[in-house]
């Protein structure tokens, strides 16, 4: 084998740590971004909030101490255990503002860069030394200064001084509602524990979906302690009997149907609470049949299985339709599902103003005291020596890059949102029926970014518009051909389908084929299968299930 040396020139993509962090921050949602900021504030001593006099909770996520009820303590005791290849993104200039117009660059950028170099920041050869494309001021003055502080929920910030109005607005959970009713019952200590145990075992819909034997075993261990020996079959049967008795009390509580093991039992409990009429009796018989027949409204098979006439079955089905399949639905705390928009779009004269939501923008800066102390100790004369000084210098650079990447993240979101509003101006004026076809590549080409960057920006980011709050991805959609040779947005077609179905005759609903013909009559080429796909995406039932009885 002959050995030799050779030279070869090649190109490869190398992502610096700060660019990797920029890409990662770009794809985070608002909640994930807030968690990332909290983590960096805890880990990096050089990173600080812009307003040091404010409480920490005023700028972060709201936390409140909720008292644990007795039933929750029982449930906790019972549940306790025994014994991508990435494409490079274009570097963007900083934008210190929160509107669609970028701010002017700093007038003393060159002087600050020279000062930083004199202080030794530019000589750092660590992982966070940067790629040299953007200069960074050593003091990293605060940004997002116009963003107001977030309130922690109460007007005074003191939980002990909560007003009656604050307490009245607090949501009541299903468990708390049932516990209030349970306190009115005169029960023994064991029966009360069994009832509390079942209440805490309910899911959000008000069902007992756990296995009955497992519930009995968990209840027995709660009464006798986890360290007790394995229970006998007789002991389990006694626990099951206690739970059955408690289940009877639970079934008589409001809302009716709570504590059911399945949908059929839930419907039966609600029918039994009604006045005893022939229609109610027929509804009870229907609920004991396979629920698939009820969902399909198969009147002929139900008549045959139940021995009832057609008119009675239809009347019973009308009664069942009016029942509540999820008794606990009205007690679900909807506040936890509230979406906080990242971008706000408002009318401004004849156009629209696009701005970032100041409530989601963290106000960060480099801690001046620590940064100045490190700058004065350039020689590493402290207790840590040169190695410790270099480590602290790296942490300072990490804090600066983190602030820069957050700035770049919001600047990119604002640029993409402004481009979307410009492209979809008709939507903001006339609604979703005026939506035009739009793909990620159009925005990417316009802004000089990669298509993957647009995908990250539009994922889990929301825009508040005059017509509601939408995810940025909502404004992108494929196109359908028209008779005139133009294109129609799939979003507009779905909106048109929703409009056609809402205006149909309830006794003779439109089939997918008829909807396709109506769209063709309006010049939109849409096949029946496409209509079915759009209808399912809108969560609209087929024609046979939309028909009224």
Image (tube, rainbow, N blue to C red):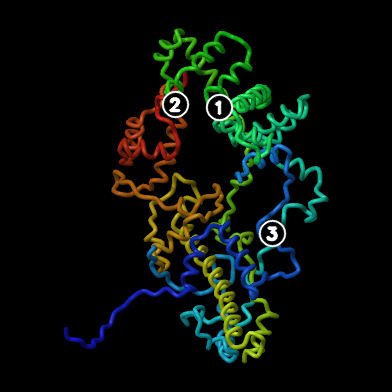
Percent coordinates x, y for residue 48 in the rendering: 66, 71
Q: Is residue 505 above or below residue 50?
A: above
The quarter holding residue 298 reads top left
SS under mark 1: loop
Whole-angstrom CA distance, mark 1 to mark 3, is 43 Å
Instruction: Specify whether 361 is left or right of 25.
Output: right
Q: Earlier in the sequence, mark 1 or mark 2?
A: 1
Q: Which label sits in the foreground, 1 or 2?
A: 1
Q: According to the image, label 3 marks what residue? A: 150
The quarter holding residue 71 reads top right
SS under mark 2: helix
The local crowd at label 2, few if under 14, some if 14 to 19, many if 20 or more residues have their Cα within 10 Å, is some
Percent coordinates x, y for residue 91 in the rendering: 45, 73
For the question of whether residue 505 can be seen, the reply is no
The foreground one among 133 and 441 is 133
The foreground one among 83 and 351 is 83
Q: Residue at x 57, y 89 (%)?
A: 120
Q: Is residue 373 above or below residue 270?
A: below
Percent coordinates x, y for residue 112 in the rendering: 59, 86
Q: Residue at x 36, y 36 (%)?
A: 532
Q: According to the image, label 2 marks what residue? A: 546
Percent coordinates x, y for residue 34 in the rendering: 60, 60
Q: According to the image, label 1 marks what residue? A: 261
């Amino acid at each position: 084998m002959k050995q030799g040396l050779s030279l070869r020139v090649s190109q490869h993509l190398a992502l610096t740590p700060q660019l990797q962090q920029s890409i990662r921050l770009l794809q985070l949602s608002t909640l994930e971004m807030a968690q990332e900021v909290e983590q960096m504030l805890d880990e990096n001593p050089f990173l600080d909030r812009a307003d040091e006099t404010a409480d920490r909770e005023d700028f972060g996520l709201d936390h409140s101490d909720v008292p644990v009820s007795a039933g929750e303590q029982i449930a906790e005791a019972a549940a306790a255990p025994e014994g991508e290849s990435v494409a490079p993104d274009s570097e963007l200039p900083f934008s210190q503002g929160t509107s669609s117009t970028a701010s002017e660059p700093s007038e003393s950028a060159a002087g600050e860069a020279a000062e930083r170099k004199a202080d030794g920041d530019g000589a750092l050869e660590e992982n966070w030394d940067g790629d040299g494309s953007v200069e960074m001021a050593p003091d990293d003055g605060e940004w997002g200064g116009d963003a107001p502080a977030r309130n922690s929920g109460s007007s005074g910030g003191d939980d002990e001084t909560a007003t009656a109005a604050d307490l009245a607005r607090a949501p009541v959970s299903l468990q708390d509602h049932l516990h209030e009713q349970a306190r009115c019952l005169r029960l023994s200590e064991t029966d009360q524990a069994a009832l509390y145990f079942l209440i805490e075992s309910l899911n959000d819909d008000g069902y007992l979906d756990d296995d009955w034997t497992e519930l009995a075993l968990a209840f027995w261990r709660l009464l006798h302690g986890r360290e007790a020996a394995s229970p006998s079959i007789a002991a389990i049967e006694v626990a099951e009997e206690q739970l059955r008795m408690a289940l009877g009390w639970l079934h008589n509580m409001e809302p009716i149907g709570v504590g059911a093991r399945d949908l059929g039992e839930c419907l039966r409990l609600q029918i039994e609470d009604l006045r005893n009429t022939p229609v109610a009796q027929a509804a009870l018989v229907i609920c004991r049949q396979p629920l698939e027949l009820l969902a399909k409204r198969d009147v002929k098979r139900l008549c045959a299985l139940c021995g009832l006439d057609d008119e009675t079955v239809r009347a019973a089905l009308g009664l069942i339709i009016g029942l509540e399949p999820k008794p606990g639905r009205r007690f679900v705390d909807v506040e936890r599902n509230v979406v906080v928009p990242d971008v706000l779009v408002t009318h401004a004269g004849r156009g629209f103003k696009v701005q970032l939501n100041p409530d989601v923008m963290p106000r960060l800066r480099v801690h001046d005291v620590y940064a100045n102390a490190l700058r004065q100790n350039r020689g590493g004369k402290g207790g840590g020596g040169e190695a410790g000084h270099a480590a602290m210098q790296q942490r300072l650079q990490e804090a600066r890059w983190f602030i820069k990447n957050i700035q770049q993240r919001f600047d990119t979101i604002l640029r993409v949102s402004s481009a979307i509003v410009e492209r979809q101006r008709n939507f903001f004026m006339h609604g979703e029926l005026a939506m035009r076809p739009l793909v990620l590549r159009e925005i990417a080409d316009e802004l000089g970014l990669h298509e993957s960057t647009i995908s990250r920006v539009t994922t889990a980011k929301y825009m508040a518009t005059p017509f509601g709050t939408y995810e940025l991805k909502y404004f992108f959609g494929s196109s359908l051909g028209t008779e005139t040779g133009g294109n129609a947005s799939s979003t507009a077609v779905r909106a048109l389908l929703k409009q056609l179905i809402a205006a149909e005759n309830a006794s003779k609903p439109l089939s997918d084929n008829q909807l396709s013909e109506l769209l063709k009559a309006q010049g939109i080429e849409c096949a029946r299968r496409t209509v079915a796909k759009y209808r399912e995406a809108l969560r609209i039932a087929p024609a046979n299930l939309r028909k009224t009885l």
